[in-house]
Amino acid sequence: MDAALQEDNNSGGVVDSITISRNDFYRGPDYTVNASTSGTVISLVSGQLVFIAATGVLATAPGSGYGYYTYTGATTLTGVNTALVYSGGTSSGFAYNGVAYGYQPAVTFVFYQTRGTTVPIPASGDYRVLFAKTLPANSGTVDCSDLMPQLAAPVAQAGNTTGLGSTAPLRNKGIYLERGDRIYVGVFPDGPNISGYTPGAHIVAQGGFF
């Protein structure tokens, strides 16, 4: 919020929306092979993904066992899903992607506010934690509005009144920032994210000046 104090035409601002989105994306399998889908005719083109959820239903054991396989053949492969050979080294081969293909661990992000400092990582006492938000496992995007504090101005519209008193007004949520304030966000180094979150994430904030 004009942290360098170079602008004179505003006194601060308010952030009323923050969204966290992972930078990595994994699509789901095109076909799943298990007891309930056994005997289904499928048609594959190069790059499509098959999840072998049960190996016992296959006529030929898959090359690497249970897990995800990407079809790598140059031509369309059509056949009964349990009769295909899910293995590499053939003209109609498959590449094994592992059991945990596409798994996205839960990640907790911590938001904090600074005032009167411009260093990237504030010294002790220069910051205040605003909130922490967890992006659930295998979820690509999460909204942070539920954790923001209520703003002073009431909302002149209908909305969810659960938990409010009979005369309590509805209020928007957001973060007021004085001119010179900054909001930082980082990955909380815990569990599978002890070294951060390698794929990274985009943090999108929306608001305005006043």
Image: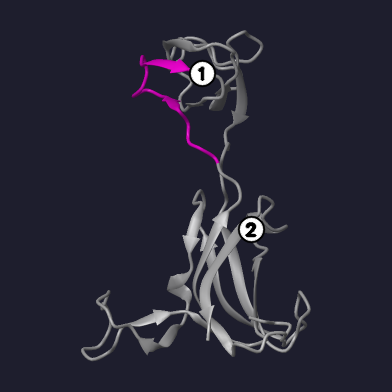
Mark earlier in primary sequence (2, 1): 1
Q: Is residue 149 above or below residue 187?
A: below
Indicate left or right for 61 with 161 as reference.
Answer: right
Nearest to viewer (mark 2 / mark 1) = 1
**Label for residue 45?**
1
Q: Amino acid at mark 2?
A: Gly
Name the colour scheme. one colour
Span of residues in magenta: 26-45
Looking at the picture, tell me which residue is in the foreground, 74 or 107: 74
Residue picked out by circle 2: 191
Chief secondary structure of the magenta portion: loop
Looking at the picture, tell me which residue is in the foreground, 98 or 161: 161
Residue contact between numbered discs 2 and 1, judged by CB atoms under 8 Å: no
Mark 2: secondary structure: helix
Give the alpha-carbon distance from disc 2 to disc 1, as whole Å: 38 Å
**Residue at (43% x, 72% y) in the render:** 146
Q: Amino acid at mark 1?
A: Val
Q: Is residue 29 above or below residue 20?
A: above
**How crowded is the residue under tag 2: few (<14 C-alpha within 10 Å), some, or many (20+)?**
few
